[in-house]
Amino acid sequence: MDRKKLIIIILLILGIVIIGGYLIYKNINKNENNTVINDYTPQEEISEEELRRTLVSLYFNNKESNTLMPEARLIDAKILATNPYQELIKLLIEGPKSDKLEKTIPDGTKINEAKIVGNTVYIDLSKEFIENQKDGLENENKTIYSIVNTLLELNEVNSVRILIDGEENKSFKDGAINFNENFEKINN
């Protein structure tokens, strides 16, 4: 009799498993309204332009806290393909989109050249970078580190060297910051 009970219990368990599996399978293929889901159709297509976009961080001065803050910007990745260093500096020169931030690069500054050598980006800027700079060490540091922090967001960049009209060892008018060495990232 023990053998008969064991067979009955095994058959009951097997029946429960089969019925449970069928019910689970049936529910997986239905949504909340009990309609069968055959294919997934996205509600909104992603355009080719949206697929090419990438997120970059540009550093500007926060008007309220008077510190450098990143502004996230979604830009077309094709723009960065040829010379990302020059393109990021152009965006810094254009200024922030947010009203709470202000640009740090002096008006009239132009980019002569931007290139990477090893892991250092060489940025050659026009003389307006020096001539139109707001006075004071704090303003000068913000100008330098808005460039440095922005470029060092790129994996291949470890430092930045600034040239003025092709010449090294220049400095701001007051001489407090000299461009005779590479700049590395700091947090303000």
Image: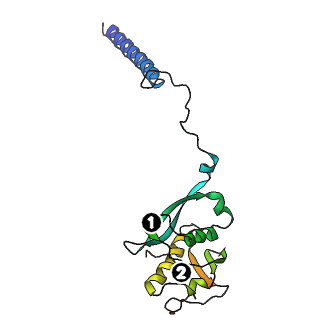
Q: Amino acid at mark 1?
A: Asp
Check the image and report above or below for 151 versus 173: above
Q: Specify whether residue 121 is in view.
A: yes
State the residue in front, 27 or 17.
27
State the residue in front, 11 or 142.
142
Q: Is residue 25 left or right of residue 12?
A: right
Colour option used: rainbow
Q: Indicate the quadrant where residue 117 lies.
A: bottom right
Q: Is residue 123 left or right of residue 22?
A: right
> Which residue lies at the image location 56% right of the left edge and 90% below the top edge?
171
Q: Which of the two discs, 1 and 2, sits closer to the camera?
A: 1
| Location of mark 1 (residue) | 99
Q: Residue 8, percent across and down?
A: 35, 10
Question: Which quadrant does the N terminus fall into?
Answer: top left
Q: Residue 72, percent across and down?
A: 49, 61
Q: Specify whether residue 181 is in view.
A: no
Q: Residue 27, percent across and down?
A: 44, 22
| Location of mark 2 (residue) | 183
> Which residue lies at the image location 59% right of the left edge and 54% below the top edge?
53
Check the image and report above or below for 74 versus 106: above
